[in-house]
Image (cartoon, rainbow, N blue to C red):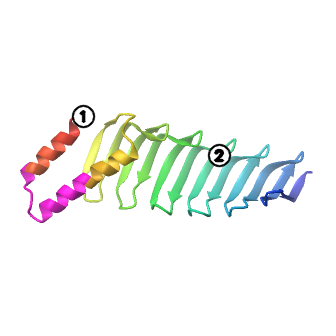
Amino acid sequence: MDGYGQLYFNDGDKYEGEFKNNLMEGYGIFYYNNGDKYEGEFKNDLMDGYGIFYCYHHGDKYEGEWKHDKREGYGLYYCYHHGNGYEGEWKNNKKEGYGIFYFPNGDRYEGEFKNDIYNGYGIFYSSLGFKYERYFKPCFSIKFLIFIYEIISFVYQLYLKRKITLFYIIILILCMLIN
């Protein structure tokens, strides 16, 4: 089949779009039986080129480059369920290269990623005004930065309530910086 058409799958999935040599090729929309949807470019029956993937169950959305059914190149990912997001480079469905990770509370990390985690030079910006700049080792994960943020937030709240002095804050931050 060549041209525009629709293809129905036994499991309830549906493709609507362009075909070439009986393959999904060009622009199309793929409807998954679970409610997910991909709208964008296809090549040889695979998501390839620019496209938008909507995850119905979690409300997630990825908009950007695809290659062989995987996120590859520049893209924006937003997780509505958790409220975080990522804008940057992808490789083989993982964060890879320069990117910005947005936390639900307004914090953000800008810097290098490798294999889906912080790896290389980066800056963590706290919504409270703190800035944490360093070379991150591969063991630094998003969970670790959230942990750092929670400690800083807790200490900052104590400082605002005058239950801790600036001297203790400096000591705690120095302890965090010394790995």
- Residue 124 shown left or right of residue 92 in the figure: left
Left or right, 64 with respect to 155, comes to right
Label 2 secondary element: strand
- Residue under label 2: 66
Q: Residues within 10 Å of mark 2 (few under 14, many from 20)?
A: many
Helix, strand or loop: magenta stretch: helix
Which residue, given by chain and number where applicable, does mark 1 sit on? 179
Write down the region rendered in magenta. 151-167
Please tell me in which quadrant of the rendered image residue 90 appears: top right
Amino acid type shown at disc 1:
Asn
- Above or below, 108 relative to 116: below
- Identify the residue shown where x is 83% and y is 54%: 18
Tell me how far mark 1 sits from mark 2, CA to CA: 38 Å
Residue drawn at x 45%, y 45% as measured from the top left: 99
Q: Quadrant of residue 178?
A: top left
Q: Identify the residue at horizontal 12%, vertical 44% (top origin).
A: 171
Q: Residues within 10 Å of mark 1 (few under 14, many from 20)?
A: few
Give how far across and how far down residue 143 sits, in percent: 37, 48
Q: Is 155 inside the magenta-drawn segment?
A: yes
